[in-house]
Image: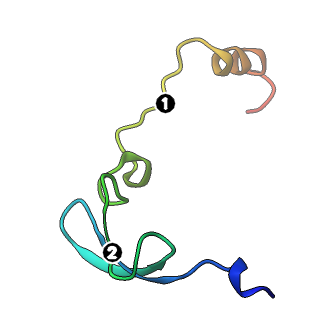
């Protein structure tokens, strides 16, 4: 394989939103670079579950249930 075709992996520091730090390998920046995250798995609703609720407003789900209400007991 060509040597110039592979990225240069090196150790960088990652700082989470709550201030915790860890090291990981990356192609970003130079060795020892610090990446400060704006969002992370500890704070973002996509990872924490958030306050998402499923609301049925008379749409497809209601029409489906109405159509097949006597089919399954």
Q: Position of residue 41 (x, y in %)?
A: 37, 59
Indicate whether 58 appears above or below 16: above
Q: Residue at x 18, y 67 (%)?
A: 19
The one of 25 and 41 positioned closer to us in this rendering? 25
**Relative to 68, is 72 above or below?**
below
How far from the left and from the top, in percent, is residue 6?
67, 80
Q: Is residue 36 left or right of residue 18?
A: right
Q: Nearer the viewer, mark 1 or mark 2?
A: 2
SS class of the residue under badge 1?
A: loop
Q: Secondary structure at mark 2?
A: loop
Q: Which mark is residue 54?
A: 1
Q: Residues within 10 Å of mark 2 (few under 14, many from 20)?
A: some
Indicate which disc residue 7 carries: none
Label 1 – label 2 distance at C-alpha? 42 Å
Disc 1: CA contacts within 10 A as few (<14), some (14-19) or many (>=20): few
Is 31 on the left-hand or right-hand side of 17? right
Q: How many marks?
A: 2
Compared to residue 69, the image places residue 52 above or below, namely: below
State the quadrant of the C terminus. top right
Asked if residue 4 lies left or right of residue 71, the reply is left
Residue that protrudes farthest toward the front in the picture: 4
For the N terminus, which image quadrant?
bottom right
65 or 46: nearer the viewer:
46
Near-viewer residue (29 or 35): 29
Answer with the quarter of the image where residue 63 lies.
Answer: top right
The location of residue 54, given as percent across then percent down, is 49, 30
Q: Is 25 drawn above or below residue 57 in the view shown?
A: below
Q: Nearer the viewer, residue 69 or 8?
A: 8
Where does label 2 land, which residue?
A: 33
């Amino acid at each position: 394989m060509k040597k110039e075709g592979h990225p240069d992996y090196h150790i960088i520091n990652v700082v989470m939103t709550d201030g915790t730090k860890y090291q990981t390998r990356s192609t970003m920046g130079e060795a020892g670079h610090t990446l400060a995250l704006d969002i992370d798995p500890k704070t973002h609703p996509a990872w924490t579950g958030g306050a998402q609720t499923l609301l049925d407003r008379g749409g497809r789900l209601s029409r489906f249930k109405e159509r097949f209400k006597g089919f399954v007991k």
